[in-house]
């Protein structure tokens, strides 16, 4: 748990339900009693998608985020109570009745697919103070909405191969390995992940390098770039600048790791 000077709290927890844990990486809870306006933070591209719900007074604002290619700023209300859900790749697709591209347009948008039916369930999550109980309530919320999605088979195979290659596999090779033609692969990828394969490969490589840096103590960035299979140090630096606006060294010096998972935010000074 992260405790800030002005009564701000942040904590992460993994699902306990084995079914839900296949599709949801973790939940997080972020609360602040601060009454000062104008606070914000920047978050960075990720292959995981995020659902967030803010509670201010008796109202909810629910959003869904997929961010493959840029740094994005979040203005924090004051005070606030927030819960977040980080989905594994293709995780959200098992809890919605339509393809992602039909429900989503943009980077971070208000997400009303489950509203208002989930409001009573969210209210109960926010009301309880026990972290394990919050986690169990969210497990139940998503278990009720779980649905099999056999249409994901092609994209799932593609995603697995992209990860195993650290984002280096070429599209034609990917299509050959899966046994589909290139156009079919590209169409399914766009339908279910709302991005191109090249965009996805870049963010997988970027996040692989962040995890490598964490595991190596963020000390030897040359080793990080080699581990992550960037072409060379220049390629590593250029890709970081493209996705974060910073060099790797400046990025790791400026971000704050939130909770126990892979959340790295940069707060305004």
Image (tube, grey):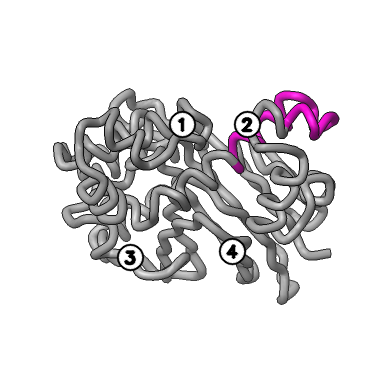
CA separation, marks 3 and 4? Answer: 25 Å
Residue most extreme to the bottom? 37
How many marks can you see?
4
Q: Identify the mark nearer the N-term, 3 or 4.
A: 4
- Residue 92 percent across, percent down from the top left: 32, 46
Horizontally, residue 67 falls left or right of residue 155, namely: right
Secondary structure character of the magenta stretch overall: helix
Tell me the mark number nearer the camera, choosing from 3 and 4. 3
Tag 3 near tag 1, CB within 8 Å: no
CA separation, marks 4 and 2? Answer: 41 Å
- Residue 168 percent across, percent down from the top left: 51, 35
Residue ID at (78%, 64%): 268
Q: Which residue is mark 3?
A: 104
Camera-side residue: 184 or 224? 184
Q: Which residue is mark 4?
A: 80
Q: Which residue is mark 1?
A: 163
Residue ID at (66%, 50%): 239
Magenta-colored span: 206-224
Tell me the mark number nearer the camera, choosing from 3 and 1. 1
Q: Identify the mark nearer the N-term, 1 or 4.
A: 4
CA separation, marks 3 and 2? Answer: 32 Å
């Amino acid at each position: 748990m992260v405790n800030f000077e002005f009564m701000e709290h942040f904590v992460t927890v993994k699902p306990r339900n084995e079914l839900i844990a296949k599709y949801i990486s973790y939940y997080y809870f972020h609360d602040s009693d601060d009454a000062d306006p104008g606070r914000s933070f920047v978050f960075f591209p990720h292959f995981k998608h995020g659902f967030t719900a803010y509670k201010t007074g008796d109202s909810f604002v629910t959003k869904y985020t997929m961010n493959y290619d840029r740094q994005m700023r979040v203005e924090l209300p004051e005070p606030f109570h927030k819960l977040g859900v980080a989905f594994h790749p293709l995780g959200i697709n098992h809890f919605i009745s339509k393809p992602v591209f039909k429900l989503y347009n943009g980077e971070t948008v208000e997400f009303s697919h489950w509203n208002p039916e989930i409001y009573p369930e969210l209210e109960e999550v926010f009301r309880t103070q026990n972290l394990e109980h919050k986690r169990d309530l969210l497990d139940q919320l998503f278990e009720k909405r779980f649905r099999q999605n056999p249409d994901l088979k092609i994209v799932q195979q593609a995603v697995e191969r992209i990860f195993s290659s650290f984002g280096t596999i070429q599209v034609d090779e990917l299509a050959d390995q899966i046994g589909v033609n290139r156009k079919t692969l590209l169409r399914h990828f766009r339908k279910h992940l709302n991005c191109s394969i090249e965009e996805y490969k870049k963010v997988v490589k970027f996040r692989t390098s962040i995890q490598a840096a964490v595991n190596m103590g963020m000390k030897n960035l040359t080793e990080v770039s080699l581990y992550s299979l960037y072409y060379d140090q220049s390629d590593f630096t250029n890709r970081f600048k493209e996705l974060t606006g910073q060099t790797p060294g400046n990025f790791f010096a400026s971000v704050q790791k939130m909770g126990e998972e892979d959340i790295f935010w940069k707060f305004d000074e």
